[in-house]
Structure formats: C-alpha cells, structure tokens
Image (cartoon, rainbow, N blue to C red):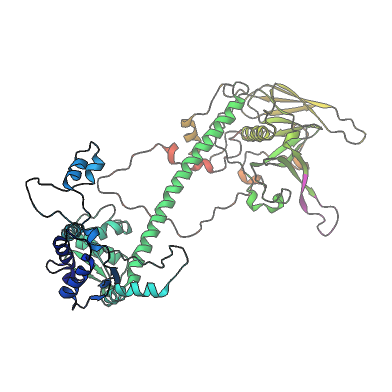
Amino acid sequence: MASPSLSQNPPGIMSVLDDVCATMHATGEGADQTLLQKLQAAVGTHEHFNSWSSGFVIHHYAGKVSYDVNGFCERNRDVLFTDLIELMQSSEYGFIRMLFPEKLDSDKKGRPTTAGSKIKKQANDLVNTLMKCTPHYIRCIKPNETKKPRDWEESRVKHQVEYLGLKENIRVRRAGFAYRRLFHKFLQRYAILTPETWPSWRGDERQGVQHLLRSVNMDPEQYQMGRSKVFVKNPESLFLLEEMRERKFDSFARVIQKAWRRHIAIRKYEQMREEAASILYNFKERRRNSINRNFVGDYLGMEERPELRQFLAKRERVDFADSITKYDRRFKPIKRDFILTPKYFYLIGREKVKKGPEKGQIKEVLKKKVELQAVSGVSLSTRQDDFFILHENDADNFLESIFKTELISLLCKRFEELTRSKLPLSFKDTLQFRVKKEGWGGGGTRSVTFIRGQGDVAALKAGGKTLTVSIGDGLPRNAKPTRKGAAQGRGGDRRQAPSRSAPPAPRGACRNGGPQMPRGDAWAQRDTYKMPQKQTRGPPAAALPARPAGHQPKARPPSEHNMDFLNVPDQGVAG
C-alpha cells in the first residue's frame, strides 16, 4: 500500500483524482496531464512520491511501482448509469444481483460514484474488519516471475526478505521466547504425553502446563509462565515436545495394530477350523478334543530347522509341518517329517551315514518330494482314528497324523488352487493302498479294516496283507466346531496328561527298529518338535493412558482375548 499521506482525504491521491474528474468531466483531453500537475502540487514533496513527464512513482511497502497517467481519468469515470444498475438489480438471478450491490437513492442528486471512491470504501471496510479480529500474517516468498519450478532469482528473494522484515522478526524472536501458546491450547496439543492430562486435564490450566513441562524434564530456563500463555525460548525445546508427541502416537498406533491383527488372526483360525470341519462333515466321526482346536501349521519350527529347510526351495512358504508316522508294506511304523508347501509335499526321514567323515551319524534324508498335482485322492475311514491314505500316480502313502484334519484341509485348499478342481476324498471302513515294487518282490496292495472297539486309542493288529484297526465311537459325524468350545480349547491346562495317546505299533513291530514308546507320555519325546523361542525385540510397548475415574472397561468373554490358541496342542489331544 502507499504511504497513509498519499491515500488520506484530503489531499490523498484518490481525492485529487476524483476532483480532477469532477472538474473536467465535460472534456477528456488534457485531463490526465492536469491530474499529474495537481499531484505534483499536492504531494510532490512527499518522500514516497516521484514524478516525470508522463507518470509518477509511488514507494509502496513492497517496493517501487511506476504508473502512467494516460487513461487514469477515463477509467476512473468509467461507471454505469443509474438506470443500468437498477436494471441489473431487478434480475431474477441472485448471482447477477450480487454483482451490483450499490445502494441507489433516486431522490439524491449528487456526483456519481467513481472507481477511486469505491476502492477507498472497500479498503476502509477491510481495515475495519481486520481491526475487529486477531490477524495472522502469512509471509509468502515469490522466487521468480516465470512461475516455473527450480527458477530462483536470488536478488528478488533477498528484496522480499528485507521488505517483509523477516530478519528483524527472527532476531527479535531469538532474543526472547519465540513460541507462545495459550494454556488450554497447549494442554490440548500435548495432553497425550502424560496419563494425568489425557484425555483432559481436571484442574487449573496453569498447573497442567507446568505438569507437562516437568514430565518431559524441560529446563525451567527454557520456558516462562505468563498470565494466560506459556512461553518457550528455544525451538529445540519445542521440537522435544513434538518428538515425544509423535512417539506416543506411534506407540498407541502399534497397540491398535496389534489388537486388530489379533482380531484378524482369531477370525482366520475360526474360519480355517470351520472349513476343515466342513470337509469331514457327515462323513467321519470327530474326536472330542480336536473339533474345536485351532490350527498352527508349523509344528516343527521350520524357521530354526536348517537341516529340514535344506530340502525346500529358497523362500518357499511352509503351510504345514509335523512329525507323522508312515507304515510300510509290512505295516511297520516309521517316523517321517511331513512338510506341505503351496506346490509340493515332502517326506523327510533319518538314516545313519555309512561312509565318509560323518560315518555313524544320523542325518536327514529326503525320502519323497511330490507335486500336489500328482495327488489323485485321499482315503479315510468313517471312525475317529488318525489314519489316512495319500494316493499318488505311482504308489500310495499310508500315514498317521494327530493333525490330520488340518493337514487334509490345507492339502485340499492348495490342490484346488493349482488344479481348479476339488481333491477327491473317500470315506470307507475298508481301505486299500498300493505299495511300490522292490526287487523281486511284487508291489500289490494292502488292506486296512476299521472296526468298533473300546476307548479313544486305536488298537492295531497286523496279519499278512491286512491291518485291522479297532477304536471306540467318537462324536457324531454331523458334529461342528463351536465358538464356546473354541474358548475351552484355548484355555486348557497344557500340563495335564493328554486324554489319548497315539496307538501302539502292531504286534511284533517296533518303531524305527527301537523299543516301543507311547507318544502320549510327553511332548518332549518327539525329538523333531523344537519350537522356536519367541524373542522380544525393542522396548516394551507403552501403556495406554489411564481411563477417567469411574470408567470400567466392558467385560469380554475369554474367547475374544485369550491367545492360548497359538500354542501347540498337547500330544494326543488333536486330530
């Protein structure tokens, strides 16, 4: 803006312009030169005004601006007639009426308004509005005139920094307390830093601000308490508050993420359990302690088992891993590690090294690697046993797993993803499986017959090419998992003895050539089970802010927050 003496009335520039227009309204020639002469006479000695033959210069706050007087008076008199304004104000469109807000008085006989008088009125209205509020000044630096990025005019920027007074402003701020904020606004922004101030401070605002500053160990010399504001001296102290505030938000976001992941995990495992139950629904009896069990997948701790990982491809995901029992052509039980990935399943055994520097040591050996597309079907009995037959193109695998439901459900899912068809499942009490031809001996088939017995433990009796399995009745075939049962399955005491153990080997047969050992005695008897130890990384999560007095959290059933379902079930309580 121009200096106040140039715009005040009289003898401001706008007043001189209106006077010239009123005096020479009948003639247009020479009015601009008359205006220049009168300006030189009225404000020619002003320090912010300079003139030449065809114009003048005004020293505005932002810099010097040159004006050409040619056309000044004509543009100042360029106003609409009163009848035209009345016509526009009578329009039925509100937008057009808004463009002509002039208040016309038909009885008033006077000089018509000019562009200069309108500018003066608008400027006065703006100043009056600003004086009624607390203005906040925003300094904008214009780096160039081309309006293009990466175009920097250093001289222009320096000039703007000077006339905006930024250097003086910064110098004054650094000399005193640069940051100032009302008590209640300061509390609202940093209340999250302490439990006492979150979600709202109950007490004197001044004491609340002092409590916040003491809680972050801010040096008392870095701040001062005013009547209604707090003053902080160095920007570093303010940055400390902002950093601690961001850390609090980050820690609380992690708590929310953890709760959400837990919720998603619970829903995922419930869905997996229901999908697995639907596969066996109306076809096979279920065990009482397995129908509501949640799935874990990796029971071998493959992340810490490089001796098993060596047989898998790099970064190959493990869907299921467990130690199972495989029966050969003579129904001799042999321990194998069964690993299921999205494209293959592996059977890994152990053999004694016969040659080399590692002679006599027990080493893992890959017994079989089969593509899932090569699986032609799965056969199971209708009773509550753990046996199943995995059919292939060449030979079949007669297997036993206490986690058979989980294994078969994952196998069906991966098979359908690869082949776009469902895996054939067969449920009969008399099963047959093919054995591979060895040497002069024929391959042929073997039969497994399931009959009703007593108890939950299967009794095996081998005779020739037939194996008879007797086992008691389980849950009905139409049994389904329940959420209530899932809660019971998660909260069980793992130190108690399992409700059932694995069936012993057939008479006269020993597992792996050694003495028989029941699998239900203890979890540690299975040397392949080495679960990875969960390690805590980083500092402990920050506690949530304290709730207001009298607020009691809503009670939740155990099934919503009990995470014991991630633990590996005891031997013999799954199926």
- Figure quadrant of residue 88: top left
Q: Is residue 494 visible?
A: no
Quarter of the image holding residue 448? top right
In the rendered image, the vertical position of residue 310 relative to residue 486, given as above or below: below
Quarter of the image for residue 360 reads bottom right
Q: Residue at x 17, y 74 (%)?
A: 43
User: Foreground: 85 or 341?
Assistant: 85
Q: Indicate left or right for 58 with 461 as reference.
A: left
Q: Position of residue 217 (x, y in %)?
A: 32, 69
Q: Nearer the viewer, residue 431 or 464?
A: 431
Quarter occupied by the N terminus: bottom left
Rendering coords of residue 565 (x, y %): 52, 40
Q: Main secondary structure of the magenta part?
A: loop
- Name the spot of residue 157 as percent of width and height, x first: 38, 72
Q: Is residue 387 visible?
A: yes
The residue that appears at 80% across and 31% down in the rendered structure is: 393
Vertical position of residue 87 compared to residue 166: above or below: above
Number of dots carrying numbers:
0
Direction from residue 177 to residue 568 in the image, left or right: right
Q: Is residue 2 above or below residue 203?
A: below
Residue 271 counted in the magenta span: no
The C terminus sits in image quarter: top right
Name the side, left or right, on which 319 lies relative to 53. Answer: right
Image coordinates of residue 369 in percent, x first then y, are 76, 41
On whether residue 357 falls in the magenta region, the answer is yes
At a point 80% along the width and 26% down the height, the residue shown is: 446
Which residues fall within the magenta stretch?
Answer: 352-366
Q: Which residue corresponds to the image point at 16% horizontal and 66% vertical from the top-left?
A: 16
